[in-house]
Image (cartoon, grey):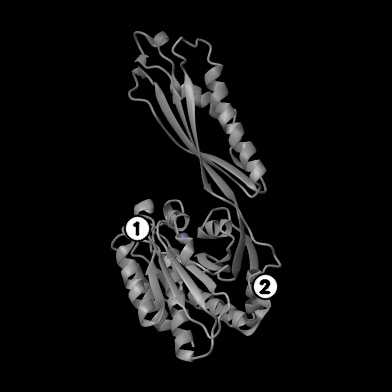
Amino acid sequence: MINVHRMTDTFMDLVQIDSVSREESRLAAYLKKQLDLLGAETVFDGSAPQTGSDTGNLIARVKGSNDRAPLLFSAHMDTVEPGRGIKPVLTNGRITSDGTTILGADDKSAIAILLEMLRVLKESGKPHPPMEFVFSTCEEIGLLGAKHLDWSLISARQGYVLDTRDPDGLVTRAPSANRLTFTVVGRDAHAGSAPEKGINAILIAARAIATLDLGRLDAETTCNLGVIKGGDAINIVPKKVQVDGEVRSHDDDKLAQVTQRMIDAFQAAATSYPDRGDDDLPYVSVDVHPDFQRTHIPDHHAVVRMAFKAAERLNRPLRLQVAGGGSDANVFFQQGINTGVLGTGMTDVHSVREYVDVADMVKSCEMVLEVTAIYQESTDYDPS
Ligand SMILES: [Zn+2]
């Protein structure tokens, strides 16, 4: 039986341990202790030097009643800012922060739910399958923990990441994304006495941007320019401006096309500049960084079938969902590990208005317990 008070208390404890990205070690130590008490075998991988975190990813293995492939469950340990000194407030079944910080339900609601699942399984004494848990670092700063995970420690081929809102949802599709940085270089000059000697980098960037379509390009593709920085003073022709943006698509061909279109727009604005000097100015340098790669779990996959069966047994709906963003599930998918993303009830994440309803965490915990039971009962869901 799920112990609602215990799960709530665990959540309140977890959010009071600060763990902004790259500073997850205190939370990781707490979590390792709880997992050890539950009889799990825990190990940290060696990803810290690559991620810049003060800890590696925490991996836990829980033995089952058989030797089948373990089921994977995953949550991330880090939070965004402002995420220090969080004071959770529980009112009428809803947990918020005190309004000055985020709450950290993203993703500590998931950690509390997974700990509660293990406690329920241990208390029930019922047979359950082998399980692996990945508690990752640095998810919020580019999925860095998952990207540098030591895969030799993982034998699971399928499972669930708990890292979205809807407790009746299962995310099986997420886009690929590229991050783009355009640096436009012109020439500085005094804006009043010698403007003709200058090449205005802001003007060139503006011409490029004016030719671009931004926003939702079609049902599966979006693009954005989100940051622009440049110039030094109002009386200086600006020599440099940097524009940062991104493209996301569920179709990798479209991702490549839109990325190229943006690059072409900036380069055309520079090369078509009328008075190009001998110094090859203006020019644009472009940095394209693949941020994450698409996830597309087929509807007939065991991970999807188990979730539907669990929802049916719980007498609840289940909605298949498409994510607009990436999560650790994208990285698992690229490694051939199919992980659907389940919701925990976390709402308005990455804001000081973030909250979670205890009732939603209970629903999420029921869901993970049920899929675990379904996997235990039948070999129909073994990874192929
Ligand atoms: Zn998250």
> Where's residue 142, x and y in %?
45, 51
Corner quadrant of residue 89: bottom left
Q: CA distance from mark 1 to mark 2?
A: 35 Å
Q: Left of 75 or right of it: where is 189?
A: left
Q: Nearer the viewer, residue 50 or 371?
A: 50
Numbered disc in front, either 1 or 2: 2
Q: Is the residue marked 2 within 8 Å of ligand 1, measured from its CB?
A: no
Residue drawn at x 64%, y 74% is 382
The disc placed on residue 20 is: 1
Question: Where is 81 relative to 57, above or below?
Answer: above
Residue 323 in view here: yes
Q: Residues within 10 Å of mark 2 (few under 14, many from 20)?
A: some
Q: Residues within 10 Å of mark 1 (few under 14, many from 20)?
A: many
Kind of element beneath mark 2: helix
> Where's residue 43, x and y in %?
38, 69
Residue 2 in view here: no
Residue drawn at x 65%, y 67% is 319
Q: Nearer the viewer, residue 51 or 246?
A: 51
Kind of residue at disc 1: Val
Return the residue at label 2. 305
